[in-house]
Amino acid sequence: MNGSIPGHSRSRMTSRSAATSTLFPEIYAVLTILPLFFRVVNLLRRYDGDRHIGIHPRWLARRFRRAITSSMEESLDARAPQRAEQVALHRDLADLVERLSGSGDRSDPLVEATLACVEAALCTWRASTAPGTPPDRERLDEASHAVRAASVALRFATADRRADRPADEGRPHRTNSSPDVSATPGSPGRTPQSHLEGKMERSEKVDIVIVGGGMAGLAVAAELSASRAADVVVLEAGPDGDREHYRWSADEPTAMRQWLDPTSDPHFWRPYATDGVSYAGISGLRRRMGGRSLYWHGVTLPIENWALESWPVGVTHDLTAEWLGGPSLYHRVSEELTKWSGYDITDPPGTGRRIAFGDYEFGPVPQAVVSRADGRWQAYSPLGQWKDGGKPRLVPDCRVLGVIISDGRAVGVRAETESGITEFRADRVVLAGGTVENSRLAIQALTEVGWLTEPRLPGLVDKVVHGFNANFDLARLSPELADAAREHSYGITACASGLRSNTFLALHVNPHGTAVLDAWVMGEQIAGEAAYVEARPAPAWPWPTSVVAGLSDIDEKLRHAQQTELQRLWSQFLDAAGADRQPLAFAPEFGSPDLQELLLAPKDATGPTEARTYSFQLGSEQHEGGTTPFGTLLDDDHQFHGVPGMYAAGPSTFPRSGAANPALTILALAKRLAHRLS
Ligand SMILES: Cc1cc2nc3c(=O)[nH]c(=O)nc-3n(C[C@H](O)[C@H](O)[C@H](O)COP(=O)(O)OP(=O)(O)OC[C@H]3O[C@@H](n4cnc5c(N)ncnc54)[C@H](O)[C@@H]3O)c2cc1C
């Protein structure tokens, strides 16, 4: 960003051979941005001074000039692409423009000015995405701040119009030209959102606020209702709709699309940018009351002892040995799920078919599901507890922007609803928004109290998963395997402990009558510093959040061991099936870009096929966790060491995740947390 624009630009242009691809964006940037820039400056001049805006217009103008010039400069720079952030920024911008255009009087010069600012920022973004112009982080920061400044200006404008009061009341007082709305680490009592006060519409007091109405949040709330201990409210960013599991309400093709092409699901939500392929694709939240408890597949496995050894002794004891002088938490939850589903989750090997070949023996997968005659099924959701109404109160369409801190402790949250900003004051705040949103909220709060030196939380893990599928002639399979396919069998076996993985195997018959074998190995990713959630401090909540993830050396070892294990399984299955096929061939890169096609291909096969291998990109297994773990961040009461009164629920709290799927542990820990809160 240093140096004169032309000099900087030319030197870069001559140093690169692809001059033609960089010339176009320069012209593009100048032509599209400059007229808008002058329009913004002219409008702002008419409002010079602090009279109406609350942010000094000269500051805004300066800010935009810098954003625009740096955009021009950086449009010629081919450093590290940040495509995902661009997309996130574009979405924010589009959102803002939409809100602006619906925000009332366009003839109001202030709204007009703000709109122009946004348009300028949009142009900045567009210029940066023209061919051959990968942007870099600083340029994106500039554009992002510009948008946020425009957003703040709009808030003041709309608050002024709505409020029947003197112009200065309810608005932060500023005496200099800088809009000091950023977080102030270590300044108890002052929240970084004071600039939102102009838009504050409501404030209410409860005992406990739960952020997120998904698997973890609802499970905690459900337990609290049983204890009747407190006035509890669950704030969920998404709507409260039909409350049905997606496999119950949609037919098979629609459900498969919602899983593997989640953009077809209106509830799909990824409120963070991603770096590369990890945490992209099918990875994301489902923003609706119920969250991913309306999407999960019901597999309920306890975390293995070899992983729990890294957990605090007290928590492990409660999960596996005994809790409050009675059965362990795992046992209690398994019993409840057994009662709900009618399937004995406490002793799955005692129920159902086993699949055996070579030296493999697969027992039934414990699943908290119920099915109906037409083949549709649903997995357990704690949301079922509210089917006849009841408590605690669920508040849909309410996104929590940040945790309010006073005197170093959590005293509530500030949330955005369709009608404006609402403060929920509470003695205790439970973060249950999924691992990445939990991390963002924690980073904001921990930064404010000065507990974090960098606004990032490491330790992010998902699962390492490889698999393959292939079609077989049903008539040529051994009778045992053919029967297993006809019965649509689903089995699991634990790998040798060094592999930190489970192997799953599913056999069924496709609509064309061919047998389908699908086998996959799911193993533990080890937490480290290299995979993290980062939230960049910004003038307004929510801070822009990004996920950085990849496989470490130790994960790479696991990956190759999994491939060897699958190769072994494949050859033993072929022996048992009396078939002769090629050995498995794995792609060199991790994370199949064509996962959807690979997983759907067996459905359409009309005869035997060679095996197709696949691996799930990090994040797509939806087992993300590990960023707010017991021990380093949480005490044994699930409470943040750095912010008393703030708690966390869900897989973000796992110090190690093992090979197991997380839901059983999420539900078990929800019981424990609810007991601590009541
Ligand atoms: C297709 C699929 C199959 C799966 N199968 C299994 C399985 O068989 N076994 C298993 O153990 N796991 C499975 N999982 C994973 C499991 O569903 C998740 O681990 C679990 O739901 C995570 O629970 P959570 O409460 O942390 O997150 P979620 O259930 O995603 O809930 C988070 C909720 O918080 C809301 N929220 C987020 N931020 C905010 C905010 N700022 N303000 C207000 N609300 C907010 C979200 O909208 C969401 O509703 C599966 C997942 C998917 C998608």
Image (tube, grey):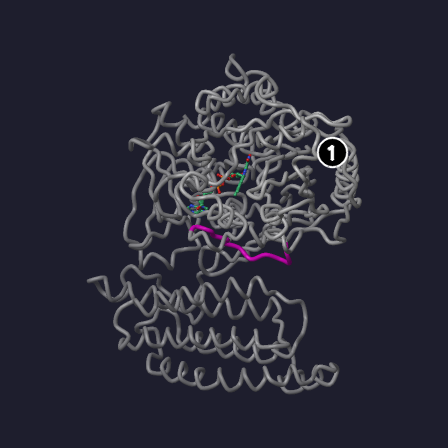
Height in image: 211 above or below 329?
below
Q: Is residue 498 left or right of residue 52?
A: right
Is residue 469 something that shows in the picture? no
The amino acid pointed to by label 1 is Ala
Residue that appears at 66% across and 52% down: 592
Vertical placement of residue 193 versus 90, above or below: above
The residue closer to the viewer here, 50 or 596, is 596
Visible residue check, residue 91: yes
Q: Residues within 10 Å of mark 1 (few under 14, many from 20)?
A: many
Left or right, residue 47 beside residue 302 = left
Residue closest to the far front: 475
In the rendered image, residue 272 lying in the magenta stretch gets the answer yes
| SS for dot 1 | helix
Q: Which residue is mark 1?
A: 577
Which residue sits at x=70%, y=40%? 526
- The quadrant of the rendering that contains the C terminus is top left
307 is within the stretch colored magenta: no
Judging depth in this view, the residue of 485 and 527 nearest the camera is 485
Q: Compared with residue 310, is residue 284 higher up or lower down, i.e. above or below?
A: below
Could you tell me which quadrant the N terminus lies in? bottom right
Q: Is residue 69 left or right of residue 591?
A: left
Residue 527 in the image: state x and y as whole percent. 68, 41
Position of residue 638 measured from the top left corner of the image (x, y, whole percent): 52, 32
Residue 297: x %, y % from top left: 52, 36
Question: Where in the figure is residue 552, as x and y percent of width and height?
Answer: 74, 47
Q: In terms of secondary structure, what is the magenta stretch mainly?
A: loop
Q: Which residues are magenta?
A: 267-277
